[in-house]
Amino acid sequence: MERRKYLQIPGPTNVPDRILRSLSKPLLNHRGKEFEKLVDYCVKGLKKIYRTENDILIFPSSGSGILEASIVNLFSRGDTIAIVKLGVFSDRMDSIAESHDLNIIPIEKEWGEAVTKSDIKKVLENDKDKEIKAICLPHNETSTGVKNDIKSISEIIKELNHPALIVVDAISSLASLELETDGWNLDVVVSSSQKGLMLPPGLGIVSISKRAWDLIEKSTMSKWYWDFKAVKERMKGNQFPYTPSTSLLFGLKESIDMLLDEGLENVWNRHGLMTTAIRNSSKAMGLKLLARDKDASNTVTAIFLPKGIKYIDLARVLSEDYNIIIGGGLKKLREKIFRIGHLGSLHHVEVYGIMGALEMALYKLEYEVELGTAAKSVAETFLEDK
Ligand SMILES: Cc1ncc(COP(=O)(O)O)c(C=O)c1O
C-alpha cells in the first residue's frame, strides 16, 4: 500500500495536510485586490514570527538565492566582512561572498563546534580601523547540528561599539529555535520556506533593519531581480516587480496561522523537547553525538555512524522497512555521521516511532542494542516533561 514517507531530513520537512490542501487552491490574479490582501497578511504574520518591526521582503527563491541577494544588496566589491565558518552552509556564505569579490575575514571553527563571543571579540578588536562591514553567520549550521548563540554575538558587537552589521542565516532556525530579530538587534535575517515554516521549497524571506538599509543605499553591486530597494517599493502596495509564487503564499498563510495558534514560544519549546528525546535516546542506545549538549541544535541532530555501519545501509533499512528518510553527512562528514531532521510539524508520537525505527534498523545491521532502549528513553523524557 502506498504510504507517506516520514521526511526526517533537515528540510524540506513534512508538510502538514492543512498546508498541502491550501497549495491546491485555484490560482489568483497576482495583480488583484485579493492577492494584495494575502500578501499583507503574510508580511504581518512573518513579522510576528521574526519578532520584528523591520521590513520583510519575500522572493521566489531557495535559501541560497536570498543569501546571495543579501550579499549583493548590502555590499560593494572590495568591502570587508567577517564570516563564521563551521560547516557546509556557513562555507556557502563564504563562497557566495568570494564570488562577488568581497574581502573576507574567516572565523573558522571545528565542524561540530559553535562560535563563541570571544572568537568574535578577537576579530573585532583587531579591526582597528573598523573596516568590517558585517559579521555573517548561521543561527543553525544544518550540516553539523550546531546552533550559535546569536544573542551574545550581537551583544559583543554592541559592547565593542563596532559598526559591523549582524547578518544571520536563519534558514534552518526560523520558527523552530528562539529568535528575536528586534530584541537581539539583528540587521539582516535570511530564511526560506522549506524548514520551520513547513512549506515546500520556493520562498526566500529576509528582514532588513534601518542600519542595513543605510548600507544598501551605498551598495554598487549589480542586481535587478534581486534588488531589495525595488522589491521594497512594490511591496509597499503588497505587490512584486514580477510574478511571485502565488500558491506558496496560500501555504504561507496557513503556516503562519498554525504557528501563531500554537504560540511561538510553544513551538520553540516543542522543538526543544523533541530534541532532548532524540538526544537522550541516541545516547541510551550508545550512539555518539557530534554536537555537545550546550551547542545542540533543536532542528537537526548529527549522530556518528557506529563502527561497521554504512550510511547507505542505515538509510536503506529505515526507508524500505520503516518509511523514514534520514540525511547523511556532507563533505568532510560524509560516511562519518547521519542526520535526523526534527523541525517543523513533529510531535511526541513521531519521535517515539522514529527512534524506535532507528533502533530496529541498527539492530538489523548487527549493532548491539537491547531492544526497547529507545522507546524507554523517549518515554522517560516525555513523561518527565511537565
Ligand atoms: C543553514 C542553511 N543555509 C543555507 C541553506 C541553503 O538553502 P537552499 O538549499 O534552499 O538553497 C540551507 C539548506 O539546507 C541551510 O540549512
Image: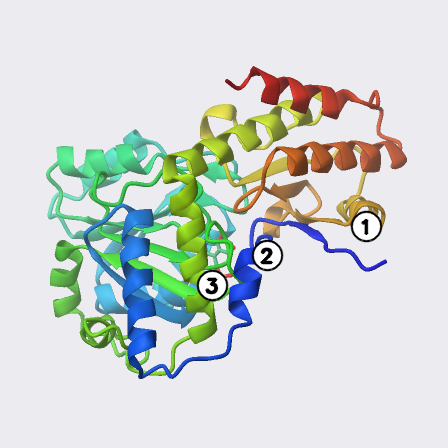
Above or below — where is 216 with respect to 360? Answer: below
| Measured Cα–Cα span from mark 1 to mark 2 | 26 Å
Q: Residue at x 84, y 29 (%)?
A: 367
Local secondary structure at mark 1? helix
Q: Closer to the camera, 30 or 188?
A: 30
Query: Assess mark 3: CB under 8 A from ligand 1?
Result: no
Kindly identify the amino acid type of the residue bearing the numbered disc 3.
Answer: Gly
Residue indicated by mark 1: 316
Task: Give the x, y percent position of residue 69.
Answer: 33, 68
Local secondary structure at mark 3? helix
Kindly identify the amino acid type of the residue bearing the numbered disc 2.
Answer: Asp
Kindly identify the amino acid type of the residue bearing the numbered disc 1.
Answer: Arg
Residue indicated by mark 2: 17
Q: Is residue 35 left or right of residue 90?
A: left
Q: Earlier in the sequence, mark 3 or mark 2?
A: 2
Residue indicated by mark 3: 251
Badge number at residue 370: none
Q: Is residue 158 left or right of residue 291?
A: left
Q: Nearer the viewer, mark 3 or mark 1?
A: 3
Task: Give the x, y percent position of residue 139.
Answer: 39, 43
User: Total number of numbered labels?
Assistant: 3
| Measured Cα–Cα span from mark 3 to mark 1 | 31 Å
